[in-house]
Image (cartoon, rainbow, N blue to C red):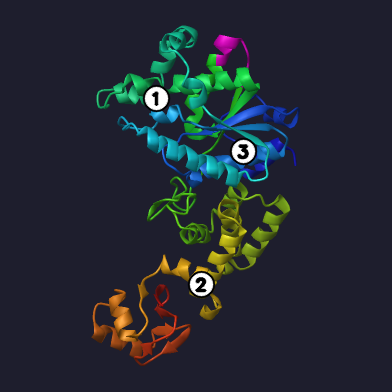
């Protein structure tokens, strides 16, 4: 499949300066994709654009992956109602390292060059920047941006000179990469369209050259109509310290039936033939959630690796499937312990249910046990007992306690 066909089939077509994206099927181009270090991890919104970048690389285009050490010192104001608080320099350094590490994971085995715009901004003299770059930027263009108009309007909170200048800084990134590396394309998320086009205009004015932008659309949850990627606990991060591997896997396992195939096109590298087969299986019996399981497996493997994915799959099978609790290894018990309540060995079943806050009183626990609604390692019990071995206690369908 040609790149233009792949992009269309997977749903990666949005705004672009190309008249016809089939030009991407011809000779390779050098392009860049950037993430600002506003946090020490990307979210799955960034991951959608990153997966699109993988297809550009796989079809022979040369990638420059940018960590915005300079732009991160200001913060992108687009879409923000209020002025951002400036981040401390040591926090930016930490965040850059986190983003760079995730690039290396998501693009493992791929040919790319990692760049940091702080490397070329740190030595630029302010007056030189105004003379050589600022002189080429019309104020009408900058004032016309929607976020500027919103911030300067009657109910706006105002905007600082620093945030007003953000698009100029990002635009110069494109100029620098064009000059130094022959980059002629910026790939970005839909929310970066305005900043990216500013770079195209700046190169035209400064270099007399034609460059392009290709953006990917926001991923929308078809079941809710809102931006995909949020959970009850907030954003879904790629960093396991922010979103555990178990919660990451569970997020994908629980996506809606209506959108699951579309999410697979965006977030996995499965072929059209493979997805058609999965879609056929889904249509036969959606209750088996084969599509969700395949999606969760593929995305978690890309972000966290095969070993950690296999581990959370075994834990999930114990909690929600028919796998034997005793088959779990120590590392997998540790995964469980980080996700569900833990009570020490030597307690009665009643004490375990109350101390773990599954139930509020001994009497309530005693009645629930007698009704057969409590199981120990998958076996229903009807009488209280003392637990002296590592055990999984289950109340109802979805409440668990680990005793260890």
Asked if residue 357 lies left or right of residue 116, the reply is left
Residue under label 2: 330
The relative height of residue 306 versus residue 222 in the rendered view (above or below) is below
Q: Which mark is residue 146?
A: 1
Residue at the extreme bottom of the image, as rendered = 383
Of marks 2 and 1, the one in the foreground: 2
Measure the alpha-carbon separation of dots 3 and 2: 37 Å
Q: Where residue 89 appears, x then y in whole percent?
A: 38, 32
> Which region of the structure is painted magenta?
203-211
Residue under label 3: 53
Of marks 3 and 1, the one in the foreground: 3
Q: Are marks 3 and 2 in contact (CB under 8 Å)?
A: no
Q: Where residue 50 appears, x then y in whole percent?
A: 57, 41
- Dot 2: few (<14), some (14–19), or many (≥20) neighbours within 10 Å? few
Q: Which mark is residue 207?
A: none
Residue name at image x 42 percent, y 73 percent: 398
Residue name at image x 75 percent, y 27 percent: 27
Q: Residue 4 falls in which quadrant of the image?
A: top right
Q: Are marks 2 and 1 in contact (CB under 8 Å)?
A: no
Q: Earlier in the sequence, mark 2 or mark 1?
A: 1
- Dot 3: few (<14), some (14–19), or many (≥20) neighbours within 10 Å? many
Taking depth in this image into account, of 92 and 374 the one nearest to the observer is 92
Whether residue 384 is visible to the viewer of this picture, yes or no, is yes
Q: Earlier in the sequence, mark 3 or mark 2?
A: 3
Q: Where residue 24 appears, x then y in whole percent?
A: 70, 30
């Amino acid at each position: 499949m040609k790149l233009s066909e792949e992009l269309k089939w997977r749903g990666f077509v949005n705004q672009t300066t190309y008249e016809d994206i089939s030009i991407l099927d011809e000779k390779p181009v050098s392009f860049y994709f950037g993430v600002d270090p506003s946090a020490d991890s990307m979210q799955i919104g960034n991951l959608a654009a990153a997966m699109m970048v993988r297809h550009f690389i796989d079809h022979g285009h040369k990638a420059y992956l940018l960590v915005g050490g300079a732009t991160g010192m200001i913060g992108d104001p687009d879409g923000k109602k209020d002025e951002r608080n400036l981040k401390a320099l040591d926090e930016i350094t930490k965040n850059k390292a986190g983003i760079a590490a995730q690039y290396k994971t998501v693009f493992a085995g791929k040919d790319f060059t990692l760049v940091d715009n702080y490397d070329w901004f740190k030595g630029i003299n302010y007056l030189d920047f105004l003379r050589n770059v600022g002189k080429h930027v019309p104020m009408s263009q900058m004032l016309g941006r929607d976020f500027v108009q919103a911030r300067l309007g009657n109910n706006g909170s105002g905007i600082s000179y620093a945030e007003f200048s953000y698009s100029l800084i990002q635009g110069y990134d494109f100029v620098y990469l064009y000059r130094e590396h022959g980059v002629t394309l910026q790939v970005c998320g839909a929310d970066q369209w305005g900043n990216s086009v500013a770079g195209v205009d700046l190169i035209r004015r400064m270099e007399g050259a034609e460059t392009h932008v290709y953006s990917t659309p926001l991923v929308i949850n078809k079941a809710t109509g809102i931006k995909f990627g949020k959970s009850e606990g907030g954003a879904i991060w790629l960093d396991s310290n922010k979103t555990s591997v178990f919660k990451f896997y569970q997020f994908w396992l629980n996506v809606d039936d209506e959108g699951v195939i579309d999410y697979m096109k965006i977030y996995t590298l499965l072929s059209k033939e493979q997805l058609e087969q999965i879609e056929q299986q889904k249509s036969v019996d959606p209750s088996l959630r084969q599509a969700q399981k395949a999606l969760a497996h593929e995305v978690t493997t890309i972000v966290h690796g095969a070993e950690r994915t296999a581990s959370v799959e075994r834990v999930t099978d114990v909690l929600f499937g028919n796998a034997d609790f005793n088959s779990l290894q120590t590392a997998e018990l540790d995964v469980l312990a980080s996700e569900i309540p833990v009570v020490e060995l030597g307690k009665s079943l009643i004490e375990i249910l109350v101390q773990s806050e599954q139930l509020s009183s001994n009497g309530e626990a005693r009645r629930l046990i007698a009704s057969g609604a409590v199981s120990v390692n998958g076996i229903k019990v009807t009488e209280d007992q003392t637990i002296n071995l590592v055990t999984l206690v289950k109340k109802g369908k979805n409440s668990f306690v680990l005793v260890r």
